[in-house]
Image (cartoon, helix red, strand yellow):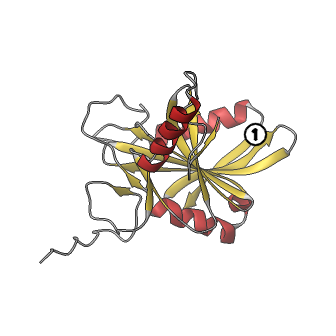
């Protein structure tokens, strides 16, 4: 007889892979496991030939998430938040701190080429030896009702830190899901193109730069 999975000790995440968390359908990106929610599309952020983050798109809203290594003894959100605020102001955006569902967050507006100033929210969660940064933009950044769906998605993310030594703020390695990697390999075999971009196509995951 199989033993039942341990019950989560907290009401919601983001979850660490080593702690009990709800079992549900998630896209496995290696260092991040993102819940699959109807009506939302998951894409990946690529820097060079590395996947460094993920974007969830739904309606007129977007959620961008990145996971980083952090010290065991302390979190880094306070430091990262100050850096983000400085960066926003450097491009003539506006931002201020406020209390949000995950603690202190940044809310403001940033200039977007051809679109004027757009609302944005920066959220941070300090976990055990990891830090999750989330950026909500579009309608969900200004409309609390629209933001609830993306906040719920953040609460169900699983972070897989791994045991290898990593410097603070070093991105946690991400990769395409097994199904997408297989599709890429099959496409490469058919095309026989040496310089095929391995992140260009996938059954669920698309690329953003």
x and y percentages locating residue 90 in the rendered image:
71, 30
177 to the left or right of 142 = left
104 to the left or right of 63 = left
The quadrant where residue 9 appears:
bottom left
Residue sitting nearer the eye, 12 or 26: 26
In this rendering, does residue 101 appear at all? no
Residue sitting nearer the eye, 83 or 8: 8
Could you tell me which residue is drawn at 11 percent across and 78 percent down?
A: 1
In this rendering, does residue 172 appear at all? yes
State how many labels appear.
1
x and y percentages locating residue 163 in the rendered image:
24, 38
Could you tell me which residue is drawn at 66 percent across and 54 percent down?
A: 62
Secondary element type, mark 1: loop
Could you tell me which residue is drawn at 55 percent across and 38 percent down?
A: 187
Instruction: In the rendered view, tell whether residue 106 sits above or below residue 35.
Output: above
193 to the left or right of 15 = right
Instruction: In the rendered view, tell whether residue 145 sits above or below residue 14.
Output: below
x and y percentages locating residue 23 in the rendered image:
35, 68
Q: Residues within 10 Å of mark 1 (few under 14, many from 20)?
A: some
The quadrant where residue 25 appears:
bottom left
Q: Farthest residue toward the bottom?
A: 1
Residue tagged 1:
93
The quadrant where residue 37 appears:
bottom right
């Amino acid at each position: 007889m199989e033993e039942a999975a341990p019950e989560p000790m907290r009401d919601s995440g983001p979850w660490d892979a080593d702690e009990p968390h709800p079992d549900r359908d998630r896209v496995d990106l290696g260092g991040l496991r993102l819940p699959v929610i109807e009506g939302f599309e998951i894409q990946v952020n690529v820097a060079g030939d590395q996947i460094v983050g993920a974007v969830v798109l739904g309606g007129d809203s977007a959620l961008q998430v990145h996971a980083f290594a952090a010290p065991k003894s302390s979190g880094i959100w306070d430091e990262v938040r100050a850096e983000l605020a400085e960066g926003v102001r450097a491009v003539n955006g506006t931002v201020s701190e406020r209390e949000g569902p995950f603690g202190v967050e940044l809310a403001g507006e940033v200039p977007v080429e051809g679109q004027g100033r757009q609302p944005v929210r920066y959220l941070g969660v300090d976990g055990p030896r990891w830090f999750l940064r989330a950026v909500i933009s579009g309608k969900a950044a200004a409309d609390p009702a629209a933001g609830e769906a993306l906040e719920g998605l953040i609460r169900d993310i699983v972070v897989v830190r791994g045991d290898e030594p990593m410097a603070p703020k070093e991105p946690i390695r991400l990769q395409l899901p097994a199904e997408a990697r297989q599709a890429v390999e099959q496409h490469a075999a058919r095309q026989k193109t040496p310089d095929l971009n391995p992140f260009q196509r996938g059954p669920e995951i698309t690329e953003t730069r």
